[in-house]
Image (cartoon, rainbow, N blue to C red):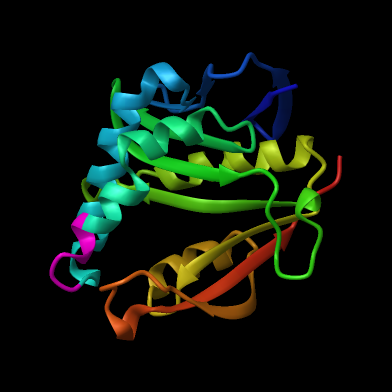
Amino acid sequence: MHYFVMRQNNTIAVYEYEPFCYYRNMRSDIDIKQMKPVDLAVLHKICCNAYIQNFYDHWEDGGLENYVNKVFGLNTLKAELADKNIQYFAAFINDTPVAFMKLNLFSNLPERPAQKGIELDKLYVLPEFKGLKVGRLLLDAAFDIAEHNKKEIFWLSVIDTNKEAIQFYGKLGFRYHSKTKLEYPKFKEELRGMWRMYLEVRKK
């Protein structure tokens, strides 16, 4: 079963929805849509554009192209869209995709049961659309999914030098858990450090 939550005037209303429908929010110009196989081309474009525009300077020569082709290649995205344990969402402003989010529905912090956790694997917004609460709207959808799937832990990894992102997640209640490290070839060594951050999911 799938749900979305609408918040208005301190009132919360929970609605069921069919998979791949839109999350309609209070801003009429922003929609959050769960992506399905037919959306492969759109997802591929926003994934590549959003990642490259945010992280082009994090790679040594040749690394970025190899990473994007591997992680956001059409075959990879096609397989992940067919995987029931993975969900992709895209944010649209006036029907133009401006951000995307990837959730792993059965993933947890080290030494914790996978079925009790949900991971925010990726969330990237095109730079020119930052500051419009697009990321927050995507996370609101993710929080709703976590709550209604009775998850206990919502977690993510963030580059430890990305103070803006750490501050953003901290304001939403995420706390530091542990350190890890990116192992992708040709990713700049000084940027490989990562923080795992988490929050406990509210129980309904």
Query: Is residue 47 visible in the rendered structure shown here?
Result: yes
124 in the magenta segment: no
Query: Is residue 201 visible in the rendered structure shown here?
Result: no
For the image, the number of numbered tags is 0
Where does the magenta region start and end? 60-65
Q: Quadrant of the N terminus?
A: top right
Left/right of residue 112 with respect to residue 172 in the rendered view: right
Above or below 80: residue 6 = above
> What residue appears at the point 71 percent right and 70 percent down from the top-left corner?
110
> What residue appears at the point 21 percent right and 47 percent down from the top-left corner?
128
Looking at the picture, how far across and down is residue 73, in whole percent?
A: 31, 41
Looking at the picture, how far across and down is residue 57, in whole percent?
A: 18, 69
Left/right of residue 55 with respect to residue 89 in the rendered view: left
Looking at the picture, how far across and down is residue 142, in whole percent?
A: 60, 41
Left/right of residue 176 with respect to residue 153 in the rendered view: left
Above or below 182: residue 83 = above
Left/right of residue 97 with respect to residue 111 in the rendered view: left
